[in-house]
Image (cartoon, rainbow, N blue to C red):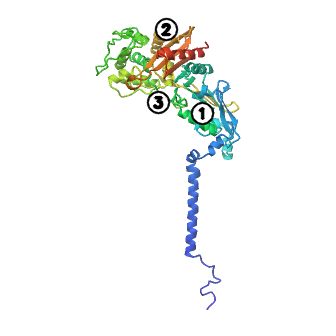
Amino acid sequence: MAPGRGGGGGPQGLPGISVTGRRAGTFCLLLIAALCVQATRVQVFRAEELNHNEANQRLTIERYARPRGDIRVGADSVTGSEPTGGRYDYKRTYTDGPLYAAVTGYASQAYGNTQLEGTEDALLSGTDSRLATWPVRDAVARRRNPGGDVRTTIDRAAQQAAMRGLGNQRGAVAAIEPATGRILALASTPSYDPGSFAGSSAADQEAWNRLQADPDQPMLNRALRQTYPPGSTFKVVTAAAALQSGVVTDPDAPTGAPYPYVLPGTTTPLVNDTPACDEPGLSLDAAMVHSCNSVMGYLGVRVGLENMVAMAEAFGFNDQELDVPVRPARSNFDTAMDESQLALSSIGQFDTAATPLVMAMVAAGVANDGTVMRPQLVDELTKDDGTTVRSVRPAVYRRAMSPAVAGQVREMMTDAVENGTGRAARIAGAVVGGKTGTAQHGVDNAGTPYAWFIAWARPEGSDAVPPVAVAVVIADGDATDVTGGALAAPVARSVMAAVLGG
């Protein structure tokens, strides 16, 4: 056999790679490529989804690896943090937890976050990029900054008055500073202690389970997350629409409303709760003072659906994104109705439903010369050293009516307090304007009525915008006289007096 020839190879080259070997190498390369693609997909494109997966405990561990920032009322913190010695280094604590639960919400190692604890979680937990002194360096090093603080708009005296006034009843209070939209009080009863389940122990779980099983629903934020038929408090909206549209030009002149007023297209009269309303042609002012269903239903139909919807929406009805920054439930005023339904809606019945927050916006808009300010629960966000991260500036929400019309509505609301159903809201040394409401509900209106009162107040002799407007609803009044004037007006009075300093 000649050198260099034959079956074993020779000096002219190395042994060749077999076809099988080449295929195996290609397959390995494909596996590596697929692994890179999958790693990229998981680490880049699915990072956000996996970070917030309920099964991922890393974020919770990081969130409670250091004390959270605080939520403040005035100069005082109403929250804190304490070491646990367990899996999570710190847990949330609350000062006067039930007093501020409707404001703070809860931050629980086991059950997540709500209210301001939820909407401002990034700032409170230290993950907000605005807290970083050197953002790029901190991002690369995955450095956690100390949690920042949330300074609320809440007035301590008003909040205490609201909770004290509501007592053990199911109900809610929302109070607003009309010129700015700052929320001064936000109360919901019965309340709960968010610190009772802030950890992850068996005791925390038992506390949570008790609250979940409680038929009185103490964890329901009735000021923001519950809607009720507003009853006659909605007549303020109808009165404003009647004046703004020109259907009524003089609140003291006869309206031409017939009595009895039969709902259009039916044989059903719209009844009143007092004989003072049982005569034809009453003025708008008289109808507000005595809370006359027949007159206000008639005027709502005269104003028309389009104008009634526009006025309701100017006060916050039908807005699904009225964030404060917590998102409240949507208040409803139907946009498609026949005239009989419109008449009922114009007195706050049928499908009309409102949160106490939106009814406080109604009173505040009237008080602020017809301009409705966007409600805000936060004044300022700061770093842990007090440096401002963001200041919340007052912002106009809608212009509901002219200043002249707002002045006419204020006069009627003042008459309702001085001479009508809202006498229990009078405050010595102050001018108070208000409107009562007793809203029927349930099958055949068999449920205990909801007692409402909305109002504003300012010092006597002052021409400035009233410093406070309030809405109160009591959902389970057990008194013999279940009316807004008897149950809700005294609560409103105490809140407004607290703001006025009385």
Which circle's residue, 1 or 2, is located before the other in the chain? 1
Residue at image x 54%, y 34%?
212
- Where is 436 relative to 39, above or below? above
Q: Distance between the residues labelled 3 and 1?
A: 22 Å
| Foreground tag (1 vs 2) | 1
Residue reaching furthest to the bottom: 1
Dot 2: what SS? helix
Which circle's residue, 2 or 3, is located before the other in the chain? 3
Q: Where is residue 240 in the image (x, y as percent from the top left)?
A: 43, 17
Work out which quarter of the rendered image holds the C terminus and state it.
top right
Q: Is residue 200 visible?
A: no
Q: Which amino acid does label 1 sit on?
A: Tyr
Residue at image x 58%, y 62%?
32
- Where is 354 relative to 410, above or below? below
Residue at image x 66%, y 34%?
69
Q: How far apart are marks 1 and 2 (CA)?
A: 42 Å
Q: Where is residue 384 in the image (x, y as percent from the top left)?
A: 69, 33
How many marks can you see?
A: 3
Residue corresponding to mark 3: 330
Residue corresponding to mark 2: 418
Are the two marked residues, 2 and 3, in contact with CB atoms closer than 8 angstroms?
no
Q: Position of residue 56 (x, y in %)?
A: 59, 47
Which circle's residue, 3 or 1, is located before the other in the chain? 1
Q: Can residue 336 be seen in this view?
A: yes
Marking on residue 106 = 1
Q: What residue type is labelled 2?
A: Glu
